[in-house]
Amino acid sequence: MVPGVPQKLRVQCPEALNQIPSPDMALTRDYRETVVARIKRDRKFARALYAEAISAILEGETSVGLSMLRDLVHAEITFKELARQTGLGEKTLHRMLGRNGNPTVRNLGVIVRSISADLGINPCIEAR
């Protein structure tokens, strides 16, 4: 008996049992790896992710927005380069963009400006 495989399938396609992955086999790539790879190869996606990050922060979903910014930094700039551009320490940047990050508005502005410059985005504010 093979767990998770219906009896009907076992009888009809016994050769398919050899193709079932073991439970400890990874079926997908890590989410972060997938996102970072997509950012690196798709500039349009990176810009859309940047816009979503800013929207999330403005809508009060700070941890979500900071997570997206962190993915952009991992894929595009690197924390070392962002530290050089902003004058903030690498460890400080990691903490600010971490899950429980709480950057000041000034520091967040500096970070966002650096990321947008790297992406070739000129942010503008529209009144609604």
Image (spheres, grey):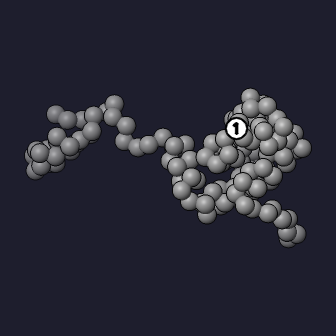
Q: Tell me: residue 38, above or below residue 95.
A: below
Give the residue displayed 66% in from the left and 41% down from the top.
78
Going by the numbered disc 1, the residue's amino acid type is Phe
Q: Nearer the viewer, residue 52 or 12?
A: 52
Q: Position of residue 124 (x, y in %)?
A: 83, 65
Q: Tell me: residue 103, above or below residue 116.
A: above
Q: Is residue 103 left or right of residue 5?
A: right
Q: Tell me: residue 48, above or below residue 62.
A: below
Where on the picture, by quarter, is residue 104? top right
Q: Within 10 angstroms of label 1, few (less than 14), some, or many (20 or more) residues?
A: many
Residue at the far top in the pictured view: 91
Q: Position of residue 16 (x, y in %)?
A: 16, 46
Q: Is residue 59 visible?
A: no
Q: Secondary structure at mark 1?
A: helix
Where on the picture, by quarter, is residue 41? bottom right
Give the residue displayed 85% in from the left and 69% down from the top.
126
Q: Position of residue 10 (x, y in %)?
A: 14, 44
Give the residue displayed 74% in from the left and 29% down from the top.
91
Give the residue displayed 51% in from the left and 43% down from the top.
33
Which residue bears the numbered disc 1? 79
Q: Is residue 50 visible?
A: yes
Q: Position of residue 74 (x, y in %)?
A: 63, 42
